Amino acid sequence: MAIRKKALKVMDIGLDLTSDELRVIGLSRHGKEYVLEKFAIGPIPSSVFAAGKVAEPRELAAKIGEICTANGIRPKRAMVSLSGKAAITRIVELPKMGFAQTRQAIDLQINQYVPFPPGDTVYQFKTLPPSAGSNPAMQEVLLVATRRSTVDSLIQTLRFLKVEPGGIKITSLAASRLILPRLEGYTQTACFIDIRDSVTDLSFFLNGNFRLSRPIELGYNSIIAKVSQALSVSNAEAEEHLRNEPVDLALPEEEVDETEDNRMREALLPIFSNFISELIRSVRYYESQAQRSDRVGKLFVYGNVQIFKNLDRYIEQQTGLEVSILSVTSLVTTLQGVYSLELLREHAEKLVVSAGLAADLVGKGKPELNLMPQSYYLKQRAWGVVAGGVVMLLIMLMVFWYQLGRLDARIGDQEKQLTKLQQEEMKWKGDAERYEQVKQEISENIPKINQVFNLVKEQPIWPPLLAELGAVTPDTVYLDEVTFNASDYLISVHGYAVSRWDIMLYCLSIDHSNLFVMGEITESEMGEGGEGGGGGGSGRASQATMGGGDVGVGAKIPGAGGVNSTGLQSIVDSASRMPMDEFRPPRWTGRPGHNIDDFFGPPPWERRPSKWEFDITINVQKEGKQQPEAVAPLDRWQEVVDDVINT
């Protein structure tokens, strides 16, 4: 029973045409998943094709409409397949350039890439990502081309069908739309094997990009023809016999029953043996082109493969490669109760290409490598553009008259605004002139300001130096007077210490500082109750030069911070007492709490308090003179002045 017209579902379809069969699929997209809404498959007369193009577009359009209507489909747009036998798909290498320059270069030498006359050639191209080890100055370009007459015959067929052409695409590239996402992350080359009616298309893909295409002159019809010839039956009978009694291609020879009729097996094995030879030759050719750096790891087989039992196992045994049979049910989601799932499973391997074509129409983005001429889209839109232009012109005229009425009112408002702005200008003109005058005066004084800044920057910053001086001053030393000499970068220190050793340790601490270098030191001992040796003190005094001074003769003592040997010896000689001087045996029994001086030092009644007076000259090092963090505010002030001048 024919499906009523109102029950037809309007949709975009993928239309895969072979020489004797039509395959149609309509998809919808839900997120990243594709859903099979409708499909149709049916025979078409081979007489509609001739010389690689549609010879009877009206007859073919009628047959397509009949098959679609019988399956509840009303096509809106159609993406049509083009077999690799009727097209050229190849990679060319060109110098790296822009898109427009690349198209111009291909136009100039198109006859070197395709066997078609330049005037009868339609092509598209795509620049491929650079491969490992490729020349950085060159680019690889994927070029697809076919005859313009072939494309025109397909467009004419769709016009008779009253369907908008969505595009024309090579079968292998159409199938890759659904297959390649399943290979994400796979690093080896995958080969797609599409067994069609009169030819088998081999296509090699690496990292999601096409690399090579090669047709093998062996197809489903030629296999059936050779089987029918071997069995002396018609093609239909041979096909029916293969469906009812399929031959297991992967069955080992030793397991073949010799008592049965093996003519079908004997007819098929030589055919597929030749096919395997061509397949291996193509794989080896591809690997040699890639200098064996890109190896083929997987084979995907689809198309007319249903009646060839265990074809995937047979190819796997013969090639040693991983082989998978692809079907549309493994690539898209199917629906229950909408169409016959049994019929779908029977033809699932044939519908891979048509599903890829439909995915191009409902998927995101513009279909790549679409062989539909741009001139077609321009012609289709020409009348629409003209009609839209007329409507827009009328609208513009109406808007113009409307705006013209408002323009006079706006002119009056603008004139009032202009008068107001002129009055504001006169009001601020005096202030602006005074501002420019002050700015000029500042500009003239900039050299003086910079000179002041530079002078300030060259002066030592004393607070950090005082902080460092306080940090290196021990508790046994106190400072009575500190004098600064900015011109010579000197610090003069007058103070007192408990002992001469404390003075020397203080000098070493100063000399070890990153900011100071010891200069001269003058020190004298002060007795109890007096100065400079008064009050019973010895009054001994000495002078030494730190940091390489010239007092005395002798080499510097390592680690002494620059105290020469003669100066240090004078300090040792003039010390009031050393720990072992005047050693006496213990005069009383040891008790807890006594220290070493109770045993080896002089008697307590012979000890007398003293203090040492000293004067030290300190040189400020480079790190003390240049302190970026201290002069940073001055740099910021100078930037502010510059900003004022440049405003």
Image (cartoon, rainbow, N blue to C red):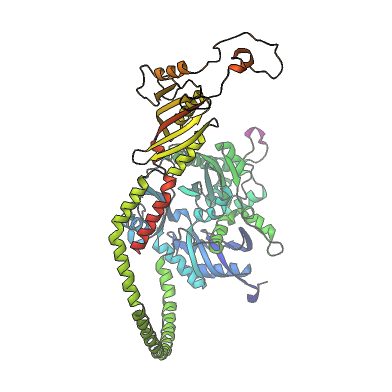
**Residue 257 sits inside the magenta stretch:** yes
User: Magenta residues?
Assistant: 251-261
Q: Nearer the viewer, residue 94 or 416?
A: 416
Figure quadrant of the C terminus:
bottom left
The residue most toward the top is 585
Snapshot quadrant of residue 447: bottom left
Figure quadrant of the N terminus:
bottom right
Q: How many marks?
A: 0
Q: In terms of secondary structure, what is the magenta stretch mainly?
A: loop
**Residue 49 sits inside the magenta stretch:** no
Snapshot quadrant of residue 36: bottom right
The residue most toward the front is 535
Q: Is residue 562 above or below residue 180?
A: above
Image coordinates of residue 199 in percent, x first then y, are 49, 51
Q: Is residue 130 visible?
A: no
Q: Is residue 382 visible?
A: yes
Image coordinates of residue 150 in percent, x first then y, are 42, 62
Q: Nearer the viewer, residue 86 or 501?
A: 501
Snapshot quadrant of residue 549: top left
Q: Residue at x 35, y 82 (%)?
A: 422
Q: Residue at x 48, y 37 (%)?
A: 468
Image coordinates of residue 533 in percent, x first then y, are 47, 24
Q: Is residue 273 above or below residue 571?
A: below
Image coordinates of residue 337 in percent, x first then y, are 72, 64
Q: Nearer the viewer, residue 644 or 157?
A: 644
Left or right for 537, reference 456: right
